[in-house]
Amino acid sequence: MATEPSAKVIDGKAVAKQIREEISAEVSKLKDAIGVVPGLAVILVGDRKDSATYVRNKKIACESVGITSFEVHLPEDASEQEVLKYISDFNDDPSVHGILVQLPLPSHMNEQTILNAVTIEKDVDGFHPLNIGRLAMRGRDPLFVPCTPKGCIELLHRYGVEIKGKRAVVIGRSNIVGMPAALLLQREDATVSIVHSRTKNPEEITRQADIIISAVGQPNMVRGSWIKPGAVIIDVGINPVEDASSPRGYRLVGDICYEEACKVAAAVTPVPGGVGPMTIAMLLSNTLSSAKRAHNFQ
């Protein structure tokens, strides 16, 4: 009886744990050598449940590796000026090495104004236009790379997936994931296509990919028929779908139809437990790098 072929599961949770252990050791080294403890400031505006959860997870992760976390929680109706004041104070505070503004911001705030106020040396989210611009240019290096796409590439590296010369398709073109993921793949010498909402024949293009990174927020959009046999799939989507049998009334699924993908792909990330834990691990990694850079510590 031939068994169904099944894809290797890319365990983001396990890899993130390993990375946190490496960071923890580095943080201790930095503290012992020059008495510096990396610090991350997180600014949360409003009462979105999901945002509050993300911020709490970031705080717990910081504590687990010995990074100090500073947290500011402002009400939904706070003024843009108040947020900018906190950013300015953190910019000037030498014990803070990374500043993160939790998105999305309330609609009355200009996201661009606020993100651009974070000094580039502390932009651990990697969203400053100078960081993105350097990421896009050959022969330049950004101070920081956005955490989610960085985590995607780190998973490929740690699972020994060859990127050079491969065809990669990124589904989604957001500033946060799709666009920087495509730039990173290009830096790794992949041949990159971006599939988005205006793409004419997404299945056909995606089916040519050796590597797929999907970040669109459409549950189970990518079916087995979209996938080339032996492809490696990184699923960034975290989409709640109704599920009466689940205690919360919903469960989380990715952009990729996981059951179908497992029968075709060589390797695939689960949702949850794939990219999510990696994003936070990369945030810690960026914060550590920032502290080392600020003190010229190798």
Image (cartoon, rainbow, N blue to C red):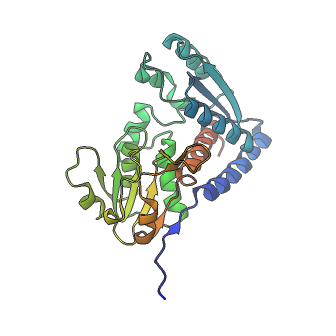
Instruction: Name the residue furthest left.
Output: 200
Q: Position of residue 173 (x, y in %)?
A: 34, 43
Image coordinates of residue 203 in percent, x first then y, are: 27, 59
Q: Residue furthest right?
A: 32
Q: Is residue 215 above or below residue 117?
A: below
The residue nearer to you, when weighing 3 against 24, is 3
Picture coordinates of residue 75, whole percent (x, y): 58, 16
* Res 151 seen here: yes
Q: Residue at x 71, y 38 (%)?
A: 67
Closer to the camera, 224 or 174?
224
Q: Nearer the viewer, residue 30 or 87?
A: 87
| 63 is higher (above) or lower (below) than 46 | below
Which quarter of the picture shows residue 227? bottom left
Q: Is residue 223 above or below residue 131?
A: below
Left or right: 61 with respect to 116? right
- The spot of residue 229 in percent (x, y) is 36, 72
Q: Residue at horizontal 49%, vertical 88%?
A: 1
The mark total stands at: 0
Residue 204 quadrant: bottom left
Residue 94 in sight here: no
Q: Residue furthest bottom?
A: 1
Residue at the image point whose x is 58% and y is 60% from the top: 11
Q: From the viewer's perspective, tell me whether residue 284 is left or right of residue 136.
A: right
